Image (cartoon, rainbow, N blue to C red):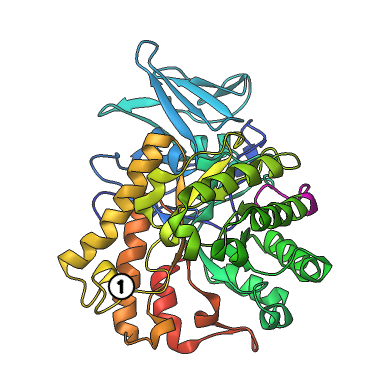
Amino acid sequence: MRGNRMLIHKKVACGLLGATMLLNQQYRVYGQPLPEDIVVEGVKVEFDATTGVPITIEGRTHVPLRLMAERLGYKTGWDALAGRVTVEDGNNHMSLQIGSPKATINGKQVYIDEREGVPVYSTTASLRNDRTYVPLRFVTENLGCEVNFENGITYITNKQEAEGPIDPWRYQGLLGQGMDVDWSKTEQGRKSYNKQAAQDFKDAGVSHVRIRIKDEADEELFKSLDQQIEDCLEVGLIPIIAYQADEFKNEPSEKNIKKVIKWWETVAKRYQDVSHLLSFDLLIEATDALNKQPEKLNEIYERIVATIRQTNPTRIIMISPRLRSDAAYLSELKIPSNHNGYLMAEWHFYASGPSKTNERKLWTIGTEEEKVLINEKIDLALEWQQSTGIPTWVGAWMPGNYNDGNDYTIHEQVVFATYISEQLIEAGIPFAVNSDTKFYDRETNAWVEEMLPVRTSIYKK
């Protein structure tokens, strides 16, 4: 890695929204050495000459404000005339004038040096190589996090749970690296699930779970789903409800459209008062007859979103394109008119694993041509989210072709998994790996030992 590095490991999701913005004196630790790495929401931050690198001023770590704020899920702006940096996510707001010892945060004055008896920092924000540098604690703690040092590692932890609405760009940053789970998809999954699984996933570095469901939204389902969501939130996993909707995908008739809308209406009402960390993934991969009728896909999204917004006006909702959520078809999506600004787009690739023969998802030893196949999809997603202002994430990819007999060795899976996860992390796109049954023995609550090298190549705590 080029340049200096620090490790900021998130023990829990950083609760930026509605957090107290005055600096907390309890955590003022000066003179700390520059740590080795920075990882925000489980994603290592790459510093180089383009982004700016951390520097030490009077023994304190200073970081580029824009880079750190954006890694924490905030949008930044620059007023060249006023020489002012702005940071916002729709709820929290910060403005910092270059050369000034103070910033305005949600209408309150927060000082970078000692003013009004509040000991903060003895250096002002500085402009270096056209980048605004501020003390690490200043940007993290004023955006609702606290910083602690332990054995040369810097930890950023949650000050309070994010109870309010979460901006989708912030949510994108929170998702990190997750996993698709069948806890509620099958009878066996529901029967085998217990809280230890959620804790084990969290301890292994998994930051969210995509809970796939195909059954009716009735009390039998809710009996287990309620517990799974509660357990996830308690241990610090982000839960995502994803609906299969097989009947609709096989026959996108008005009758089946109404069934899907009713399903989501019931689910939305059930969880309307649950933490905003819970999100709704409207459809698990558009396949079958639906692939030939993209207008039906856009129609059902429009109608489902309108229904959900009646009870959940600010919950994150996810839509995905046709042809197994291929990023190449993101451009066909019609943005639902009632999305209220809380919308993400999901896309998939290698959801059933790579192939040694299929040219569309070819991977043998990781040739340049094979890497291009991965990078092209990522670039498509980045271009789409830039043009629409809607963040994306990958809802499913698989390290091996497990569903087709799996002709990839563990070493080959590690090589593929390492490359694809590194590319997504570098692009700032979170992802879920498909799926838990390949990595975790739910009968014994134990990780599959054979898959340990593959798992640890993806989830780096």
Residue found farthest to the right: 219
- In the picture as drawn, the residue positioned furthest to the top comes out as 81
166, above or below 105, in the image? below
> Would you say residue 29 is visible in this rendering?
no
Residue at screen point 59% across, 42% down: 302
Measured as percent of width and height from the top left, residue 187 is found at 70, 80
Q: In front: 305, or 272?
A: 305
- At x 23% / y 52%, what residue is drawn? 2
Left of 412 or right of it: where is 111? right
- The location of residue 106, given as percent across then percent down, is 62, 23
Classed neighbour count for the residue bearing mark 1: other residues with Cα under 10 Å, few (<14), some (14–19), many (≥20): many
Residue 259's place in the image compared with 87, above or below, is below
Return the residue at label 1: 416
Dominant secondary structure of the residues highlighted in magenta in the image: loop
Is 231 displayed left or right of 152 in the figure?
right
Which residue is at the front of the view, 348 or 44?
Answer: 348
Q: Give the range drawn in magenta.
A: 269-278
x 25%, y 39%: residue: 50
Amino acid of disc 1: Phe
Residue 271 painted magenta: yes
The answer to which of 415 and 315 lies nearer the viewer is: 315
Left or right placement of residue 13 versus residue 152 in this view: right
Residue 136 among magenta residues: no
x 45%, y 48%: residue: 392
Residue 83 in the image: x percent, y percent? 38, 15
- The total of numbered circles placed on residues is 1
Disc 1 secondary structure class: helix
